[in-house]
Image (cartoon, rainbow, N blue to C red):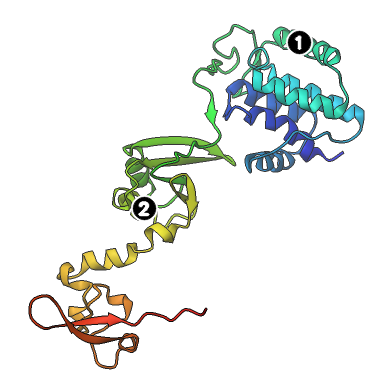
Amino acid sequence: MDPIPFLANIISLSHSDGKLSATENSQLEAIRSELNSKKSDFAKANKIVEMGNYQLTPIGSFTDQVKNLECILRLACADDELAAHEVELISAFCQSVGIYQDQLDKIAADFISTLQNLGKICASCGSQASRDALYCPNCGAGLSDSDGSVQLAFEIPDKGISIEFSDSSSTTFPKALEIAKISDGYQTCVQLKKNWHLAYYKSGSVLDALPLAKTLSGTRNRRVFLNGTEVTWDELFGFMWCSTQRARAYRPVEYCFGKDQNRINPSGCRHSQMDWVEWSEWFKYGRWEKGGLVGAKAIWLFRQRAHSP
């Protein structure tokens, strides 16, 4: 039996509500230890689930599948009674395995009773405590789940600009985190054992998001969403290099027109290669004409490209 999908089925249930409680986390570690599973296999299974859209899948022999179901139920009942979304997932798994409702009810009842007798497991040291204990009797860590849940995925708004990035050793990371926390909406979650952060700008204006984007210029793990859809970083912030150069210029207002290079261009972008010299390539694509309502003015008209029928 492949241990990775076996573990992935168990982990998947803990991710189904988007949060991983301290009790669920401790139960996952206890199950991994009892199954003698390698931490590397557990990490691979966790990565598969975190990629999204994972479906509970029967693994191995019927005995293996029942054992898998028992572990899934153990995790589902760790916090309290089965939640509605957990019941739905487990019922679908049972149908694919061939376990009927009365059998499921019996297995679930046994596990709830067992977990109530076992009490809580400390996420810090693995020690057991009574069901109503607030602190671990061994290490003193808090056992309440009210502050122990961890968000596992971001809720990307369908309007505006959202930027997500992970913890980094970059010198600009503290500043980036500071800016993100004062955005229109800030979220944090854990993915692949890394802390990720999301900043939201409801206006959808690139200028509003620009301060954060600049501090993330050297960060590898970053993503940007426009109106809920992921876009490439350069699609929104590809102009930042030009913007930085302009800000450093002696006369920023004149910088984009190329005056400091004595190669004036009418487009207002020195990198467009529309220099105002007689050998400029762009002069091939149009002509001068006289026009204007008042007086005769020279107007440049770009030649339209002919379309094939």
Q: Position of residue 271 (x, y in %)?
A: 31, 76
Specify whether residue 126 is in view.
Answer: no
Give the distance between the C-alpha atoms of the residues marked 1 and 2, in whole angstroms.
Answer: 51 Å
Quarter of the image for the N terminus: give it: top right
Tag shown at residue 213: 2
Give whichever of 83, 307 is nearer the camera.
307
Is residue 225 visible from the viewing direction of this image? yes
Residue at the location (72% across, 7% down)? Answer: 117
Closer to the N terminus: mark 1 or mark 2? 1
Q: Could you classify mark 1 by the number of other residues whose Cα lies within 10 Å: few (under 14), some (14-19), or many (20 or more)? A: few
**Is residue 291 shown above or below 4?**
below
- 180 or 40, which is in the foreground? 180
Q: Nearer the viewer, residue 94 or 283?
A: 283
Residue appearing at x 62%, y 23% in the figure: 125
> For the residue marked with disc 1, what is the amino acid?
Thr
The residue at which mark 1 appears reads as 114
Q: Is residue 93 above or below residue 111?
A: below
Mark 2 closeness class: few <14, some 14–19, many ≥20 residues within 10 Å: many
Left or right side of 99 for 84: left
Quadrant of the image occupied by residue 248: bottom left
Residue found farthest to the front: 309
Q: Where on the picture, by quarter, is residue 16? A: top right
The picture places residue 34, in percent across and down from the top left corner, at 78, 26
Rendering quarter of residue 132: top right
Q: Nearer the viewer, residue 123 or 273?
A: 273
Q: Are marks 1 and 2 in contact (CB under 8 Å)?
A: no
Residue sitting at 53 percent across and 29 percent down? Answer: 150
Q: Nearer the viewer, mark 1 or mark 2?
A: 2
Secondary element at tag 2? helix
